[in-house]
Amino acid sequence: MSVNPVETVALKPPMLADVEALLPTLPDDVENELANYEAQIRKYLAGEIGETKMQKLRLHFGTYAQRQEGVQMQRIKIPGGFLSAEQLTRLADAADRFGSNFIHFTTREDAQLYYVRLEEAPALLRFLAAVGITTREACGNTVRNITACYRAGVSHNEAFNVLPYAEALFRFLVRHKQHQNLGRKFKITFEGCAEDHSALRIHDLGFWAVNRIVDGQLKRGFKVYMGGGLGGAPHLAHLYTEFLPVEELFNLTTAVLRVFDRYGERKSRMKARMKFLIQTMGWEAFLEALENERELIGALAFKDEVAKREPLPAEPLSRSRGLAQLDPRTEDRGFRHWVRAAVVAHKVAGFRGVQVRIKLGDITAERARQLADVAQQFSAGQLRVSIEQNLYLPWAREEELFDLYLALKKISLVEIGAGTVTDVTTCPGSDTCRLGIASAKGLGSAISEAFDGALAKFSELARPLRVKISGCPNGCAQHAIADIGFHAAAFSHQGRTVPAHLLFVGGQTNPDSAQFGRLIGKFPARRSVQVIETLLQLYQEEGRAAEDFNAFAARVGDERLKAALEPLRAVPDFADDPTSYQDYGHENERFAIRQGVKGECAGATVAEAIPTIEQAKEGLAQAEALLYHKEYEQAQRAAYEAAAAAARVPLYERLVDPFTSEEALWEFENLFVLSGLTHGAWANLAARFAEWQVSVAPENVAQERVAEAREFVRYCATFSAT
């Protein structure tokens, strides 16, 4: 059974003194930003700053409003899905100390903790940062967690290990001043295998590893896709190039982000993703803008040192050559079933990868600690998170597989089915998400369990299928790319609200044949298992030899599927079947759609306080006073702040509200100077003014800088951003 967070809210308060005692000294930049976060939270709780400003800040740190009032969900980045045993243990400890004693893994390879108190979030973040875990930019209008193939570095058919490149790009982008105020979120993934385990074509940027002979030498590079996305209007990414040399990774990514930031929609939040920018500009015009930006940026420092960073275990490699040499106990029937379902081929002789199924992405803190111990003993202390919400042990020795099986069995983690039809993907849905309409987890559990009951006869036939369930149209569970996908909805019938799901059929992610599922109909939630049963019965009876489910569904056509499913669309009268009016997992509650509740997926854009030129002029007056008193260094810094305050005025017209002065000057340059709106004026503004912050100037230079700031303030007073 999955963990129900609603049942785990009786918490003991975290022992904050004990937490602080465990912490080593953090890097100055991390400690400073967390100290500021803590100070802003105190001001917010005291009523000194508004809700919107607080929302912008906490989303930048991954602290997300939960459905339940007074508590938060904390999203935690796992870059590339790479997780050490020590980090998993720390996540488990954090779940106990600050959350509700369980961890949820997401389709973005993030971890999430629930029922976190806002005032304790900074202590939680320090606790995680002590072992190298960050939550920075896990939410908000930023580059979200960069995902990578969970088999990276150990796959038997990968072009090369993409994980170090994903990590390098993560380090380059996180906290980068130029990418903190995007129009909306931006998603990046890396894939190295011959198969696509990362859903390349639903990302803003998807990098697929390829090798090519260039001038007689083998070169690493990427096949690049851009402009994909899910949600209510899904788009498949366009192919940008068949080969991007790895050395150009930073240049291309920076250029795409700049173009998206500069020209992307900001007023209509539902159209503020890059897929809509490409649609609005047109692919050719977008490419022209992108190539111009790449040339303007030029080469960025990127040495392919990551090619040398293969994450091999420290101990000598096994000499085993295959399962035939294993312990005679391998005749154990349960073990052999587990091997078939969970053990994966490896690039290094004597090793295997092992899938650990985490049902619906949920694992208790205690079991996570136990799994971390298993990973330490049997997988060189390494784990990976997959977009299917499972964990993966990448370094299992063949001769130790049976002992690993026993260790996992002892902690109840040998349930087979990872990557099969029973391994249903769900988002948190209405259990904890403010936007959730119905319980995705409740339905996911019901479908998974049905393959041990009513659907058992289809288990082998349906084995390769993927079922994904989202709690709303936003598609966090990626239902649009499932063979069978659902997203929550509702019916109104006889004055009552009935939980329902929209059914999608035929989605797949293989880049060469990627497609979104087709909408087949809307059905009461309690008919969803019967919907799957009807589809599989039809597939069994009318499918051709070696015909996969999606090919079958396309051949028979949507009208045939709709006709077969039509009897399941009807909502029975409440008196005849009251269970049809109950949501899965919430049988004791009356189902209702929450009205007037806003989610935070789009993030806030501007704070309540509107910037004015008068504020900039006050800063100028201070700078001039400092000049008079011969405080030249302080004068130029005051002039810098005045210029940044002036830049915020036209930026606010474009719904851009930077966190820092440095970001404000950069955004002015990117949105207005580089787009041509200033007609050549104020070129290299951000870099030029940044010198005022670091250089000690003599009197004449300080006077020139104050004068330049005065001129810039006057310019902003009359400049129109529209």
Image: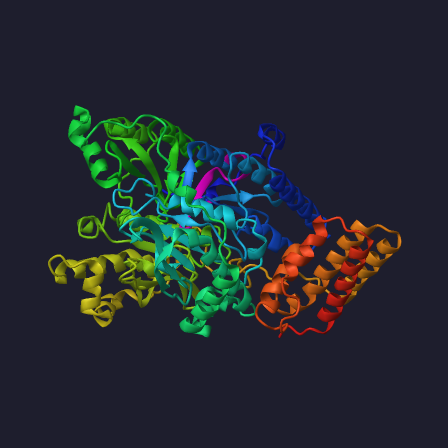
Quadrant including the N terminus? top left
Percent x, y for residue 515?
A: 30, 64
Q: Would residue 156 appear left or right of 28 to someone viewing this image?
A: left
Q: Position of residue 601 (x, y in %)?
A: 51, 58
Q: Count up the numbered dots.
A: 0
Quarter of the image with the C terminus in it: bottom right
Q: Hey, which quadrant is residue 611 in on the image?
A: bottom right
Residue drawn at point x = 76 percent, y = 53 percent: 637
Q: Is residue 203 visible?
A: yes
Tell me if 662 is positioned left or right of 457 in this view: right
Q: Position of residue 376 (x, y in %)?
A: 38, 28
Where 439 sits versus 26, above or below?
A: below
Q: Is the residue 114 above or below the residue 177 in the image?
A: above
Near-viewer residue (91 or 79): 79
Residue 105 lies in the magenta-colored region: yes
> Furthest residue to the right?
629
Q: Is residue 276 above or below residue 24?
A: below
In this orientation, does residue 105 appear? no
Taking depth in this image into account, of 637 and 538 the one nearest to the observer is 637
Is 444 inside the magenta-drawn segment?
Answer: no
**Residue at image coords 52%, 36%:** 94
The span shown in magenta is 96-111
Reply above or below: 105 against 639. above
Q: Quadrant of residue 615?
A: bottom right
Where residue 328 sits in the image (x, y, percent)? 16, 24
Indicate how the structure is coloured in the image: rainbow
Residue most extreme to the front? 215
